[in-house]
Amino acid sequence: MSRHLYLETMESRKEIHFAPVQGYTDSIYRNLHHSMFKGIDAYYTPFIRLEKGHEFRPRDLRDCDPSVNTVERFIPQVLGGEPGELRLALTMLREKGFQQADINLGCPFPMIARKGKGAGLLPFPEKVKALLDILGEFKDITCSLKMRLGMERPDECLALSPVLNEAPLSAVFVHARVGVQEYKGEVNLDAFERFLEGCHLPLYYNGDLKTTQDIQTIMERFPSLRGVMIGRGLLANPALAEEYLGGKSLTAGERLTRFRTFHDALLAAYAERLQGDAHLLMKMKTFWEEFMPWTDRKALKKIHKSTKMSQYHEAVLMAFTGDRAEV
Ligand SMILES: Cc1cc2nc3c(=O)[nH]c(=O)nc-3n(C[C@H](O)[C@H](O)[C@H](O)COP(=O)(O)O)c2cc1C
C-alpha cells in the first residue's frame, strides 16, 4: 500500500470503543477480551462513583488501578454529578497517573438520576456547564463525555450543544435513547442526527449495534462520526468489532473454538478472584445473560438453573456443542 493511501485509510478509519457495562466489563473481562479479540480502540471502566459524597468504593479503585489493567487504551469513567465530586474523582485519577477520563451523563437509574447525577443532569445546561468548568483545573487530563439524548425528551441534548461545544472535551459518546427508556424501546436516530448537526466535537454513536450490518448502516448514515461505541453487541458476540474490521464473519467452527476459549479463560480468572462457587456461578450466569444469545434455549435455561459447578459445566458443554452460530 502506498504511504498516501495508508495515511488516507488511517485518517478515515472509524474507531470502535467497548462501552462500559456495570457487572460485565470489569478488568478481568476487559483484559481477556483485549488479548483474544481484535478491533477495539478503547476500553472503559463502568462508572466510578463517590459514596457519601467523598468515599470511593474499594472495588472501583481496584478495578481502575493501572497495575491490573493490561489493555492498550484504557479509560476510567466517573459519574457526573456535583462539581465537587468530579473534582475529587479526577484528583484520584490524577494521583493514579491517568491522563484520560470519561464522564458519565447517561446513567438512567432513578437512584442516580433523581439525585441530579448521570442522565439526571441532562435537562439542566447550566448545571452541566458548572460541572464541566471543573475541567479547567485538570488540563493534564483529557476528558470525554458519555450521554444520552435527554432524560425525558430527545431534544434536551440540543440545549446542551452550546455548553458542550465550548467545553474542553475530547469527544462525546451519545446513547441514542432518553433516560426514561433505560435500555428498552427504539433508539432515536432522527434526534441523534439533529444533535450531530450542532455538535462540533468528535462524536461517537452508541445504541443497539448488534451486527456488522448495524455498524455499517450507522457509519453510512452518519459519515462525519469519529466512530461508534458498542456494549451489549460485543458482550453477545465478542468478535463483532473484529468481524466488522476484517470484512468477514468468523466461521461457525472458529466462533465455537474462540468463544469457548474466552469463556474458559474468564471462568478460570473469576474462580481465582471470587470467594466460593456461589459467587462464581452468579458471575457466570450474569455473563450468559448477554453472551451468545443464539444459544440453544434449553442449554441457556440449564446454565441459569445450575446451583453447582458440576451442573454448570454440563450446561456449558451443551451450550457449546449445540451452538448453532446464528448471528
Ligand atoms: C447492565 C448495564 C450496565 C451499564 N453500565 C454502564 C456504566 O457503568 N457506564 C456507562 O457509561 N454506561 C453503562 N451502560 C450503558 C452502556 O454503556 C451502553 O450505553 C448501552 O447499553 C447502549 O449501548 P448498547 O446497545 O451497545 O449496549 C450500562 C448498560 C447496561 C445494560
Image: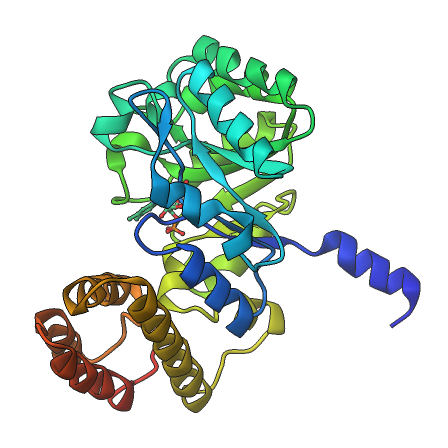
| In this view, 193 is above or below 134 | below
Residue 214 in percent (x, y) is at 46, 59
Name the quadrant of the C terminus: bottom left
Which residue is painted at 63% across and 23% down in the image? 138
- Is 317 on the left-hand or right-hand side of 104? left
Dividing the picture into quarters, in which one does residue 167 lie?
top right
Dividing the picture into quarters, in which one does residue 281 lie?
bottom left
- Is 20 on the left-hand or right-hand side of 141? left
Q: Is residue 212 something one can see in this rendering?
A: no
- Is 287 on the left-hand or right-hand side of 169? left
Residue 123 in percent (x, y) is at 37, 16
Which residue is painted at 39% across and 55% down in the image? 25
Which residue is painted at 65% across and 54% down in the image? 14
Name the quadrant of the N terminus: bottom right
Dividing the picture into quarters, in which one does residue 111 lie?
top left
Which residue is painted at 45% across and 15% down in the image? 84
Q: Residue furthest right?
A: 3
Nearer to the camera, 58 or 134: 58
Nearer to the camera, 199 or 41: 41
Q: Is residue 148 something one can see in this rendering?
A: yes
